[in-house]
Image (cartoon, rainbow, N blue to C red):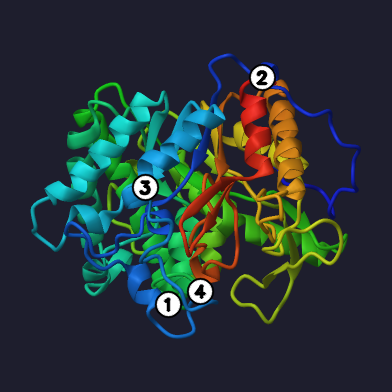
């Protein structure tokens, strides 16, 4: 496994702005969304409570005290939202299934009203020339499963396979592209170790068991999806970061390697048949997950593609106070950053894609999320002049072009996100959309970045 050799790279001259003709004619161009962040309709048509409903209702968890109860009201306004995607020139749309809309309890039958909603949504995509890309799990676990232990319990693996079976049976005649999980790192580590995502736990052993069960549920769902959708394309989406050592000190380089073991290899190694990295397993000691016979073989089920979500590199320093990994990810102190405090480094996208391709050869790869948050405002002319996000898009698509030229088998790109939305622990204080949402009126406005993306896609 190869890692960057040193501290952050110096700035480079910008690449020429990309054109759609720089990419293959069959390249997929889309936007991505997720159910809890946009749908609203929190208690409509049989939907039950999710862990994010409970988390958001807990004082102090969400920065602005909000929730996804209404969000963008996409549940009722989806035709308008899909029209925006079509008019922009998208040919694909990534969405997620809200598990609490499909099953209301352990042993319950699938909720027909929930399945009907997604059936209408898929039909709407196809009518507009948008290839549907369905994500089965984007973090909104039903609360009734969390009350029984959540992903820490092996029974949740079985429940996820049941979800995959029900949804693919209903939608598989029209949906051919399936992502089992979005960002298992966030489900496991941010939600169960760092505690600032639902369910808000802070225990490493729990987090690593959660991670194992999420990966296992992916592997066990793959053959079920294939049985229900014989021509399915199946994969999952990982959040990955290129890594930098904070200095030339050997201690910081060693810290970068340790962080790499958990942040990168803990997911990719088992997915591609290598098991968990031994050095990381030894480091976590008694917090290592319980693994049963056959689990690792199931996790390594062959897939058709890998989704990569990229936002920024991580700079890692040695820190003995942070046990057991002795690592700390540093906040940027210079250079361009977004409203989330994330550094903007487009070349990191090409670097990351090239490393994954070189080390694992996963086959076709898609950038399933990439985007930026800025302090957007509606100008007196009624427009949203988000020049920084427009430039972000241009520079990252130039990096995508560079990765493809280097031999990475890239097949598509999904901008995050189509709409401003509920941004998890940040509430509605951060905006990632190419479309501005006025949450008081639910008015949609295409931002300048969305206009540029549309012009790019139309070849203007």
Q: Crowding near pointer 4: few (<14 within 10 Å), some, many (20+)?
A: some
Q: Is residue 201 left or right of residue 103?
A: right
User: Where residue 201 is drawn, which disc sits there?
Assistant: 1
User: Where residue 126 is drawn, which disc sits there?
Assistant: none
Q: Is residue 378 left or right of residue 225?
A: right
Labels 4 & 1 near each other (Cβ < 8 A): no
Q: Is residue 210 left or right of residue 351?
A: left
**Whole-Å distance between the Cαs marked 1 and 2?**
47 Å
Labels 2, 3: front one: 3
Labels 2 & 4 near each other (Cβ < 8 A): no
User: Where residue 77 is drawn, which disc sits there?
Assistant: 3
Instruction: Provide the secondary structure element on which disc 1 rests.
Output: loop
Instruction: Provide the secondary structure element on which disc 4 rests.
Output: loop
| Residue 359 seen from this side | yes
Quadrant including the C terminus: top right
**Whole-Å distance between the Cαs marked 2 and 3?**
29 Å
Quadrant including the N terminus: top right
Q: Crowding near pointer 1: few (<14 within 10 Å), some, many (20+)?
A: some
**Sequence-wise, which precedes: disc 2 or disc 3?**
3
368 w.r.t. 159: above or below: above
Labels 4, 1: front one: 4
Which residue does the numbered mark 4 point to in the structure image?
A: 196
User: Where residue 459 is drawn, which disc sits there?
Assistant: 2
Instruction: Provide the secondary structure element on which disc 2 rests.
Output: loop
Labels 2, 4: front one: 2
């Amino acid at each position: 496994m190869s890692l960057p050799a040193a501290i952050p790279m110096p700035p480079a001259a910008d690449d020429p702005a990309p054109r759609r003709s720089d990419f293959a004619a069959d390249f997929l161009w889309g936007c991505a969304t997720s159910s809890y962040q946009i749908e609203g309709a929190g208690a409509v048509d049989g939907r039950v409570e999710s862990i994010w409903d409970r988390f958001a209702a807990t004082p102090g968890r969400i920065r602005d005290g909000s929730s996804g109860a209404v969000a963008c009201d996409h549940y009722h306004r989806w035709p308008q939202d899909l029209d925006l995607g079509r008019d922009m020139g998208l040919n694909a749309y990534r969405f997620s299934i809200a598990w609490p809309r499909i099953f209301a309890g352990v042993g319950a039958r699938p909720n027909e009203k929930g399945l009907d909603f997604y059936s209408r949504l898929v039909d709407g995509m196809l009518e507009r020339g948008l290839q549907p890309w369905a994500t089965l799990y984007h973090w909104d676990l039903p609360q009734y499963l969390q009350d029984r232990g959540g992903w820490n319990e092996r029974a949740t693996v079985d429940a996820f396979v049941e979800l995959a079976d029900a949804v693919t049976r209903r939608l598989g005649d029209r949906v051919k592209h399936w992502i089992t999980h979005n960002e298992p790192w966030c489900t496991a580590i941010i939600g169960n170790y760092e505690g600032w995502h639902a369910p808000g736990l802070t225990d490493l052993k729990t987090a690593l068991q959660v991670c194992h069960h999420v990966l296992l549920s992916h592997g066990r769902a793959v053959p079920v999806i294939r049985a229900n959708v014989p021509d399915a394309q199946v994969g999952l989406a990982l959040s990955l970061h290129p890594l930098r050592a904070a200095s030339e000190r050997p201690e910081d380089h060693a810290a970068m390697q340790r962080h790499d073991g958990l942040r990168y290899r803990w997911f990719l190694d088992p997915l591609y048949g290598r098991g968990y990295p031994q050095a990381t397993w030894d480091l976590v000691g008694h917090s290592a997950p319980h693994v049963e016979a056959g689990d690792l073989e199931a996790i390594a089920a062959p897939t058709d593609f890998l989704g990569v979500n990229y936002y920024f590199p991580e700079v890692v320093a040695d820190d003995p106070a942070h046990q057991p990994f002795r690592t700390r990810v540093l906040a940027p102190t210079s250079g361009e950053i977004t409203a989330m405090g994330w550094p903007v480094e487009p070349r990191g996208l090409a670097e990351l894609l090239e490393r994954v391709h070189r080390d694992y050869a996963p086959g076709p790869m898609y950038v399933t999320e990439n985007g930026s948050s800025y302090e957007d405002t509606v100008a007196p002319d009624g427009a949203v002049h988000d020049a920084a996000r427009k430039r972000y898009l241009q520079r990252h698509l130039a990096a995508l072009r560079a990765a493809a030229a280097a031999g990475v088998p890239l097949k598509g790109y999904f901008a995050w996100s189509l709409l401003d939305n509920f941004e998890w622990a940040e509430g509605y204080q951060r905006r990632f959309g190419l479309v501005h949402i006025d949450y008081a009126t639910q008015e949609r406005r295409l931002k300048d970045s969305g206009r540029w993306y549309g012009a790019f896609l139309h070849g203007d």
